[in-house]
Amino acid sequence: RASGLRAPARRAAMSMLTFDRTDITQTAQAERGTMEVLPLSKGKRQNKIVLGDADGVVQALGMRKGEDTRSSVFRSATGPDPIASLTLGSGKGQEDKIFVASGATVRGVNKKGKEFFKFSTNLTEPIRDVRVDGDRIWATGEYVSNQYVDCVDAHFFASNEVIADSRIAPVVLDAEKNPVLACRDRFVRVVQGSDLYYEAAVAGAASALHVCERNDSLRREHRDAATRETVDPRAHSRPHGETRRSLPPDFEHASRREVLFGTEQGLCGQLFLDGERVARGWVIDTRSHRLAGSGGVSAIDAECDLTGDGLNDVVIGRDDGSVETYAFDENGDPQIAGRVSCGEAVQTLKHGRVTTPFPEILAHTFSGKVVSFKPGADSTSADGFGMGEALDDAQAAARRFAEKKRVDDVKLETDRLEAEVQVARAKYASLSGDLIAADGPSRVLDRFRLDPETATHRLTLEAPAAIESVAVHVSSQHVDLLDEYGAGGADPCGGPD
C-alpha cells in the first residue's frame, strides 16, 4: 500500500505471544462496554478498574505490585436497573469521571464513588451506550441516538436497523464530535446533528467499533512537524519517549480519523473517515489466518503495544470467548501474534497495568469474570527482548512460595465455605419443608447466525448457570437439529411442531 513514509521494518515471521492469565474478580452478569481503566494516579504505576454489572452495582478496585489481594476503592448500587454502559468522560478535566447508564438515566460518579451528576433522559427505550464530552451527552438506544447539550435535547437520529455499537469522533469538523454507529444492516454510519452524513458498507453485520485516538494523534504530530520544516521529520522529538518505530503507517490519512469495525461474521476492518469521504484500509478475515469458525467480534482495543515493535497492536474479543492479538508486518498489514480464550463471550476489552506494572489485556466476560492476560516470560519483542516480567532466582522462589501459600489459603477457604453451605442447607431444609428453591430470573445470551462455511444456522446459548435443557419451537419450517460438539444433546425433530 502506498504511503507517504514507509512503516519501520519488522520481523518477517512473527513469533506467537504467550499469555499468563490472572483472574481479578467476579461481578454479576455484564453487558457490553461496562468496564473502564482509570488513568494512573500521581506516583502510581498500576491502574485501577471500574466495573458495572446487571445488579446495578458500580465498583472500582486495584491490585498492588507483588500482592495477589485486591483492594476495593468503592462499591455502590445505582438502582434496580442493570448497568448497560460505563464510560469515562472525554472532555477536559473529565478523564477520571465515570458515567454510567441504566434504564433511561445517566449518572456521573467520581473516582471515590460519590455521585455528582444524575440526568433522566426522555428516551422511550433503554440506553445501550453513553458517551460524554464536556457538557454534551450522546445516549444511544436500540434504534435511536440522542445528543443532549447541558441536559437539553439537541439532536435526534433514528436508524433504519439495530445499532450494535457507537463511538464519538471529530469526523466532519475538528471542533465538533460526531456519533459513529455500527448497524446490523452492514453499515457504519456517521451522524451530523440530526441527519445522516454518510454511511460505509461493510462485509457483515457491524457489531463493534473502536476509534484509534493515539494513532490519529501520532499521525497529526508527524504531519505538523513535517509541515513546519524546522526539524527533521524522521528525528523530531516526540512526547513520552516515542521513537521512530512508534509512528503508525498510513501517514497520508493524517487528516482523517481511524476507526476499526468488527462484524458478527468475524471480520475486523479499518476505515479512515473525514468530512468528504471514507478511505478503506486492511481487513482481518479469520479464514486467512486459519481461524475458521471464530465467533463474531464483540470488542476491539487498539491502544496498547503488546508485541514491543513500537506500534499499537489490535486486540479483538469474540463472542466465542477467544481474544486475539494482531501485530503489523513491514507492509502495515495485520498478522496474528497471539490467541487465548476466556471460555465465554467477551463483553469488553481494555488495556492497562492492573495486576503488574507491565502492559496487559483486560477482559470482562458475560458471566462477570474480569481477567487479565499479560505477555508471558517466554514472549519476546520484535527486537528480541523479553516481554514478560524478568525474575531472578530469589524472586522466582518467592513467587513460587506465594503461589503455594495462595493455593493453601484457597483450599482452607473452600473447606470453610463448604461447611457453611452444609449448615445453611440443613437450616433451610428445616424451614422450607416440601417447598422447592428457585433462583431469580437471569439473562441468557443467545445467537442465531448463518454459517456460510457449513451452510447451516448456528444456535448458541450462554447462561450464568448450567443449562439443563433447551426447547426450540418451530412454527412452519422443517428443521434438522445437529449437535455441533457430538455430545448427544440435540434431539432432532423431523418437522414443525
Image (cartoon, helix red, strand yellow):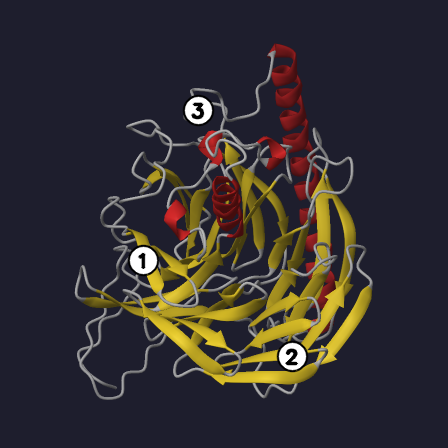
Quadrant of res 205: bottom left
In terms of sequence position, does the residue under pointer 1 or pointer 2 come before the other? 2
Q: Secondary structure at mark 3?
A: loop
Instruction: Read off the residue under disc 1.
Output: 280
Q: Amino acid at mark 3?
A: Thr
Residue sitting at 54 percent across and 59 percent down? 367
Residue 312: % across, % down: 47, 41
Who is closer to the viewer here, 127 or 271? 271
Question: Which residue bears the numbered disc 2?
Answer: 148
Q: Residues under labels 2 and 3: Cα distance?
A: 47 Å
- Is residue 267 in sight in this rendering? no
Please identify, in this view, whether the residue under mark 1 or under mark 3 is nearer the observer. Answer: 1
Name of the residue lying farthest toward the top: 393
**Looking at the rendering, which quadrant does residue 334 occupy?**
top left
Q: Marks 1 and 2, Cα distance to the nearest angstrom?
A: 31 Å
Quarter of the picture containing the C terminus is: bottom left
Left or right, 184 with respect to 345, comes to: left
Q: Are marks 2 and 3 in contact (CB under 8 Å)?
A: no
Question: Measured along the vertical axis of the image, is residue 177 above or below residue 419?
Answer: below
Picture coordinates of residue 54, whole percent (x, y): 62, 68
| Residue 214 against residue 144 in the figure, above or below | above
In front of the other: 54 or 169: 169
The type of residue carrying mark 2 is Tyr
Give the residue displayed 30% in from the left and 62% down from the top. Answer: 265
Residue 132 seen: yes
Q: Does 473 appear above or below 297?
A: below
Q: Is residue 467 left or right of residue 99?
A: left
Residue behind mark 3 = 380
Q: On the rendered structure, is 160 left or right of 399?
A: left
Residue at the spot x=27%, y=64% of the render?
Answer: 203
Q: Nearer the viewer, mark 2 or mark 3?
A: 2
Q: Nearer the viewer, residue 476 or 331?
A: 331
